[in-house]
Amino acid sequence: MAMVFSKVLTADDIENGLSIPGCSLGQLPDQEGLTMSMQVHDRNGQDWTFSCTIKRNDSVGHFLSVGWNKFVRERDLRVDDKVTIHEEAMKKQGSGTWIKVEVKRKIRLFGEDIWADV
């Protein structure tokens, strides 16, 4: 399983959608406003569809804006949770990849910080 992207969430990610820099995803089409769907699954095997739009910002260049409000609400995501997107090979189909989203929350246990699944 290869990690594609990982980020500690900000209030903007929670309220307005996750922003993934284009450099994390390889070559994005150079079409600002292009919309596509990203099919992902979580650690429970539940499938999610994230609406994605290519946008441009002078400071970061092209990036993917991910609409994931339902996922945020249902998983009760919070500022400082960590989201990681992985790409993994399909087992049964023999070719292609799955996109897996993983969320962890930092908790303090016996004086130590650990990341627990959300």
Image (tube, grey):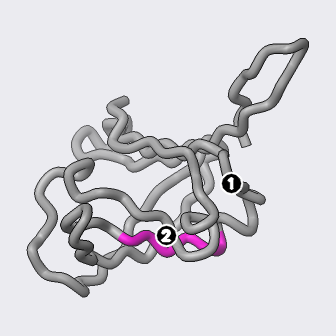
Mark closer to the observer (2, 1): 1
Q: 89 above or below 69?
A: above
**Is 35 on the left or on the right of 19, as rendered?**
left
Disc number placed over residue 49 in the picture, else none: 2
The earlier-in-sequence mark between 2 and 1 is 2
Q: What's the residue at 61%, 41% (across, down)?
A: 43
* Left or right position of 54 against 46: left
Q: In which quarter of the image is the N terminus?
A: top left
What amino acid is found at the position of numbered circle 1 in the picture? Val
Compared with residue 108, is residue 84 higher up or lower down, i.e. above or below? Answer: below
Which percent across, then down, holds residue 77? 71, 56
Could you say which is closer to the camera, residue 49 or residue 10?
A: 10
The residue where tag 1 is placed is 79
Among the 4 quarters of the image, the one containing residue 105: top right
Q: How crowded is mark 2: few (under 14 residues within 10 Å), some or many (20 or more)?
A: some
Which image quarter: residue 86? Answer: top left
**Is residue 103 located in the magenta-colored stretch of the structure?**
no
Magenta segment boundaries in residue numbering: 65-70
Query: Residue 45 location, x and y as percent?
Result: 60, 47
Return the residue found at the far bottom: 33
Secondary structure, mark 1, is: loop
- Say if 36 sits above or below 8 in the image: below
Circle number at residue 63:
none
Badge 2 amino acid: Thr
